[in-house]
Amino acid sequence: MSTGLPAFYPWQTALAQRWLSQRERFAHAWLIHGLPGIGKVAFARAAAASLLCESPVQGLACGACAACAWTAAGHHPDLRLIRPDAVAIEEGEVDTDNQAGRAAKTPSRDIRVEQLRELSNWFNTATHRGGWRVAVIYPADAMNAITANALLKVLEEPPAHTVFLLVAHAPDRLLPTLVSRCRRLPLSAPSQSDSLQWLQSQGVEQPATWLAAAGGAPLRAWAHAQAHDHPYPKWLPDVLQMMESASEHMAGQLADQLDKLSTAEWVDPLQRMLVDVQLACAGAAPRYYPALDAAVSAIARRASPASIAETASWLLQQRALAQHPLNTKLLAQTAMHRLIRAGRSR
């Protein structure tokens, strides 16, 4: 279990204070949504801590009461975190008793219906200190139809003194009837200045390039800066060189290289690179990879905007199938050849 009281990021505090000041007439279910990498889960967990706090300060957790101590220690009896087993493992917060029986299996990336059914006794008992009971469900998009319907039945007759905080990247992927049972709380990306200030405080050098590569999402930018030497994949300049030279030999080499990655790992950077090419075709500055501006502009000067747009649309379709590609090597080869054709002279 991780320790420490969950806290809001600096760009979330003002919204959280306004929102939590309404706790006397608080809705029983909230759908917290926004772009990946802006701190939605942190917001929901900090909100749970604030709702459970016995002496909130301006709506936020005081950090000094018994409830805050239990939350910080990870064992508040009126708090439940409902997330896939794989996410719990990544966070280092595994329920060892429940996980032991599934040790031999690959950790699920779905929220299982059993996880909701296990809460029935929790719902039917009084809260420990007579206050709120909070269930944080994330990512809510990880619920399959069976799990979503089980939650819907709970929300149709919500347990007393219980607040559900659902966190989702894409609300349109959720069951519409489930969304209709929730109040929506959209979280916007922080301003560029707030993001850059926070990244600098975390010791990230050249934060603007990392933030651009992450599409303006500071947490994603920070994670990438911790894991990589450059804000773009090391193979991406080779893709641009391949497009400029129309080298079939490079296409084969790159396909071999990309086949060692998950499909999502290379499709996303290619999509971002093509957005930069489209912007360059229109005479605009790059959005994601300013460090590659010279190579991107060289492609834009000779490429057909229609071909670039067509390839970008094709990649978008492949991303939808990224979890279940029929042949990853063939997909990588096809992508490289499409990029060569897209980069040819108008």
Image (tube, rainbow, N blue to C red):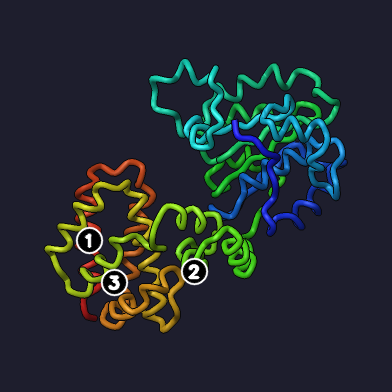
**Is residue 157 something one can see in this rendering?**
no
Q: Nearer the viewer, residue 174 or 256?
A: 256
**Is residue 111 something one can see in this rendering?**
yes
- Label 2, secondary structure: give it: loop
x and y percentages locating residue 253 in the rendered image:
16, 57
Residue topped by disc 3: 307
Residue topped by disc 1: 336
- The answer to whether residue 38 is above or below residue 77 is below
Name of the residue lying farthest toward the front: 203
- Label 3, secondary structure: give it: helix
- The answer to whether residue 346 is above or below residue 84 is below
Q: Earlier in the sequence, mark 1 or mark 2?
A: 2
Distance Cα–Cα, label 2 vs label 3: 33 Å
Residue 202: quarter of image: bottom right
Residue topped by disc 2: 206
| Image quadrant where one finds the N terminus | top right
Q: What kind of residue is marked 3?
A: Ser
x and y percentages locating residue 136 in the rendered image:
65, 36
Q: Nearer the viewer, residue 147 or 85?
A: 85
- Can you tell which of label 2 and label 3 is closer to the viewer? 2
Residue 272: quarter of image: bottom left
Q: What kind of residue is marked 2?
A: Gln
Q: Residue at x 70, y 46 (%)?
A: 7
- Can you tell which of label 3 and label 1 is closer to the viewer? 1
